[in-house]
Image (cartoon, rainbow, N blue to C red):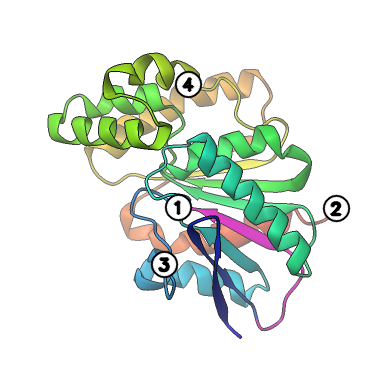
Amino acid sequence: MESRNFQLDTEWNMIHYPKQPTGFGVLIIGDERHYVDEKSSFWTQNEGKRAMIEKLKNEGYTVFYSNLYGKNWGSERAVELAKRLYEYMIRMEILNEKIHLLAEGMGALVALKLMDEMKSKIRSVLLVNPVLSLSKHLEQEKEHKFFYKKVLKELAYSYGTEITKIEDTVIKDNQEPNSISNGLPVQIIHVLSGNRAYKQSNILKQLSVKWEDAASPVTVTYMLPEKKQQIGYQMTKFFKKNETNL
């Protein structure tokens, strides 16, 4: 069996099995286009993402992820479901209890909360073009009125509040992090593609100074779009580096 889809709560989840498992698991937390249904997922339908899954499987990793209520923007119910998925995997599959996290874009908001709440269960964290701060992200989106309104609607739905209350109920709890690692090894890969990505790179450079001052084990790699195929190699190299202590 190469993969399996199943439901937790109302949400579909998917597991990808390697032919020669090493016992290490990778939880993927996707960006805003991420989805899982009863038969497939964004990560099986998108060519680039499918190649990353195959790379992980070829290296012996059991890969799993959830729909997480769609565009969740780091909501608590998405975090709780991710924790339930972890508990399910440890109970049902033969896996080392310390897993790797792979989060992209918006998925980093869930990953950051999991790093706080599941520190002892996480081995390492790889973030690709992460949204690390809702407040900073919304500042950028204000320049694009259509997208700004769209994100506000998604936030209101995900957090179960009114659009007019977003800043008071959500943004104040999702400020720019001075330290993101909590002692866990973190690698950030930032692909420099488009105007927004370059603005985000400036934020990362500012944060890198803070992380360095705090001696946080965070490394940042900048990558040109034509080099994106190297993400799979960078990813497995980073994960394996953090598997010496079981």
- The part of the image, by quadrant, that contains residue 118 is top right
Which tag, 2 or 1, sits closer to the chain's start? Answer: 1
Q: Secondary structure at mark 4?
A: loop
Residue kind at label 1, given as amino acid type? Gly
The residue type indicated by label 4 comes to Glu
Numbered disc 1: secondary structure: loop
**CA gap, disc 2 and disc 3:** 35 Å
Residue located 71% across and 81% down the image:
20
Using the numbered discs, state the Cα–Cα distance from disc 4 to disc 3 in whole angstroms: 33 Å
Question: From the viewer's perspective, is the residue at label 1 or at label 3 nearer?
Answer: 3
| Residue 241 x/y as whole percent | 72, 54
Lower sequence index among marks 2 and 3? 3
Question: SS at mark 3?
Answer: loop
Label number found at residue 245: 2
Q: Amino acid at mark 3?
A: Asp
Real-space Cα separation, disc 1 to disc 4, in angstroms:
20 Å
Query: Spatial distance from mark 2 to mark 1, Cα to Cα?
Result: 27 Å
Mark 4 closeness class: few <14, some 14–19, many ≥20 residues within 10 Å: some
Front residue of this view, candidates 109 and 58: 109
Q: Residue 16, image x and y in percent?
A: 58, 73
Which residue position is annotated with label 4?
176
Please tell me whether residue 24 belongs to the stretch shown in magenta. Answer: yes
State which tag comes first along the sequence, 1 or 4.
1
Tag 2 secondary structure: loop
Q: Classify 57 as above or below 73.
A: below
The relative height of residue 182 versus residue 243 in the rendered view (above or below) is above
For residue 9, side relative to residue 146 (left or right): right
Q: CA distance from mark 2 to mark 4?
A: 31 Å
Is 229 included in the stretch rendered in magenta?
A: no
Dots 2, 1 in contact, CB < 8 A = no
Q: Amino acid at mark 2?
A: Asn
* Residue bearing mark 3: 37
